[in-house]
Image: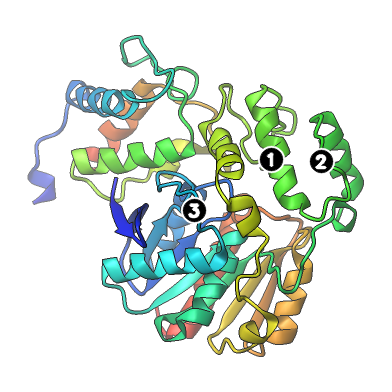
């Protein structure tokens, strides 16, 4: 059945990710006050830490009903954590893996 | 974000994968993210993983008291009861390892095996002075650079060092930017770390500092009574090695693995090596052919 599911557009994914990030960061002290969009950076703009990455990954898997997404492929480069990610990087990763890559 | 009310507080936990149930217990001043991004993706293919935040850490509550290994073993027991898990394999890093060992002492019928990753066991290693650490001069130099006030012969240098790093991070002077190839707690963030602030709040506003120093019943005699298989996997350069050798002497079923060229945080620095040995050990003790 998985192959019959409609492909998710980048716009749909972006909308979902922005909603998750907005909900997550709403009650943080010194929360980011600007609009969250494709160019928003998780660490530099939203002040993400590793526990926030876990919460984001879990929320994305629940939102898109897709467990076991390989987030380590997004977060690791050459055996080390990437220093930061833009929302657009996350959307592109999800576009690939939610649509059956 | 799953929260379970256990032992009178809320504990944040995650469950991943399928197979025999394995609990991953992080150490002090971190949270379940310690395991989530590197170790869990490799282990979840073979085991059902339960990760949780110790009290005072991550998204779990920070009550004013109850931070001994006995208290945290009681938290774990309540969490496993809440989840309906009858028997588990325990994997703990650092203080999380001491919690795992204490759990195996208190609830042996619930434990299949214990993996101790660089766990300092207070009964065997009552003090941690900087002068006893491998590469002590370099650590002393770094403490000096951090403008730390801890005396170099403090008997609890492990906690003191974490405290110094947290304060430095909040001042914008964390070490990681200067040493990008090593893991440094609270490192690498361009903004004040909430995890660092949480660690300092835990030390300053709860009984944690006193509780961490308590034996709390985890005596050499009771440890020697553990009959379950134990894997002690320690960094070759770790300051916790005295605990490793004592475990080997006291536990006839203790298997020792040293991680080459690695220190205390070897599960983060060498996750593939760590997972290979943990998986092999768990497969031996579960007799699972996978």
Say the numbered circle drawn on residue B35.
3
Q: Are marks 3 and 1 in contact (CB under 8 Å)?
A: no
Determine the CA span between mark 2 and mark 3: 30 Å
Residue positioned 28% across, 66% down in the render: B82
Q: Is residue B74 left or right of residue B30?
A: left
Residue positioned 75% across, 74% down in the render: B124
Of badges 2 and 3, nearer the viewer stands 2
Locate the N terminus of chain B and report the quarter of the image it occupies. Answer: top left
Residue positioned 26% across, 43% down in the render: A61
Q: Is residue B81 left or right of residue B148?
A: left
Q: Badge 1: how crowded within 10 Å, few (<14), some, or many (20+)?
A: many
Q: Residue furthest top?
A: A34
Q: Position of residue A98 (x, y in %)?
A: 23, 39
Report the number of discs: 3
- Can residue A90 be seen here? yes
Q: Which residue is mark 1?
A: B163
Locate the C terminus of chain B and report the quarter of the image it occupies. Answer: bottom left
Front one among B161 and B219: B219
- Can residue A101 be seen here? no
Q: Are marks 2 and 3 in contact (CB under 8 Å)?
A: no
Say the numbered circle drawn on residue B105.
none
Q: Earlier in the sequence, mark 3 or mark 1?
A: 3
Q: Earlier in the sequence, mark 2 or mark 3?
A: 3
Check if mark 2 and mark 1 are on a common chain.
Answer: yes
Determine the CA span between mark 3 and mark 1: 22 Å
Q: On what subunit does the disc labeled 3 rest?
A: B
Q: Which residue is mark 2?
A: B150
Check if mark 3 and mark 1 are on a common chain.
Answer: yes
Q: Are marks 2 and 1 in contact (CB under 8 Å)?
A: yes
Q: Badge 2: how crowded within 10 Å, few (<14), some, or many (20+)?
A: some
Q: Earlier in the sequence, mark 2 or mark 1?
A: 2
């Amino acid at each position: 059945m998985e192959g019959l599911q409609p492909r998710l557009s980048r716009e749909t994914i972006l909308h979902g990710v922005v909603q998750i990030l907005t909900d997550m960061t709403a009650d943080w002290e010194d929360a980011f006050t600007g609009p969250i969009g494709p160019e928003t950076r998780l660490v530099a703009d939203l002040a993400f830490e590793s526990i926030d990455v876990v919460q984001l990954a879990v929320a994305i898997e629940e939102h898109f009903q897709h467990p076991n997404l390989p987030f380590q492929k997004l977060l690791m480069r050459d055996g080390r954590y990437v220093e930061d990610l833009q929302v657009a990087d996350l959307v592109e990763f999800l576009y690939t893996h939610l649509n059956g890559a | 974000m799953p929260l379970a009310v256990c032992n009178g507080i809320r504990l944040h936990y995650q469950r991943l994968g399928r197979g025999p149930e394995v609990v991953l217990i992080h150490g002090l001043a971190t949270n379940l993210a310690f395991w989530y991004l590197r170790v869990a993706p490799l282990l979840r293919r073979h085991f059902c993983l339960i990760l949780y935040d110790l009290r005072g850490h991550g998204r779990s509550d920070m009550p004013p008291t109850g931070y001994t290994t006995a208290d945290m073993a009681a938290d774990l027991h309540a969490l496993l009861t809440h989840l309906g898990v009858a028997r588990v394999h325990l994997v703990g890093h650092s203080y999380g390892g001491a919690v795992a060992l204490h759990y195996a002492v208190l609830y042996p019928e619930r434990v299949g095996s214990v993996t101790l990753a660089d766990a300092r066991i207070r009964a065997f290693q009552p003090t941690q002075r900087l002068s006893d650490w491998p590469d002590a001069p370099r650590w002393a130099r770094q403490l000096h650079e951090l403008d730390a006030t801890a005396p170099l012969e403090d008997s609890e240098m492990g906690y003191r060092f974490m405290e110094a790093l947290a304060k430095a991070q909040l001042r914008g002077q964390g070490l990681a930017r200067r040493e990008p190839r090593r893991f440094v707690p609270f490192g690498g963030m361009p903004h004040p770390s909430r995890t660092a602030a949480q660690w300092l709040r835990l030390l300053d506003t709860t009984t944690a500092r006193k509780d961490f120093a308590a034996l709390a019943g985890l005596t050499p005699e009771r440890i020697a009574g553990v009959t379950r298989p134990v894997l002690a996997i320690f960094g070759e350069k770790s300051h916790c090695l005295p605990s490793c050798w004592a475990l080997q002497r006291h536990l006839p079923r203790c298997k020792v693995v040293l991680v080459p060229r690695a220190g205390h945080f070897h599960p983060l620095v060498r996750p593939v090596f760590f997972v290979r040995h943990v998986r092999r050990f768990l497969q031996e003790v579960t007799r699972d052919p996978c």
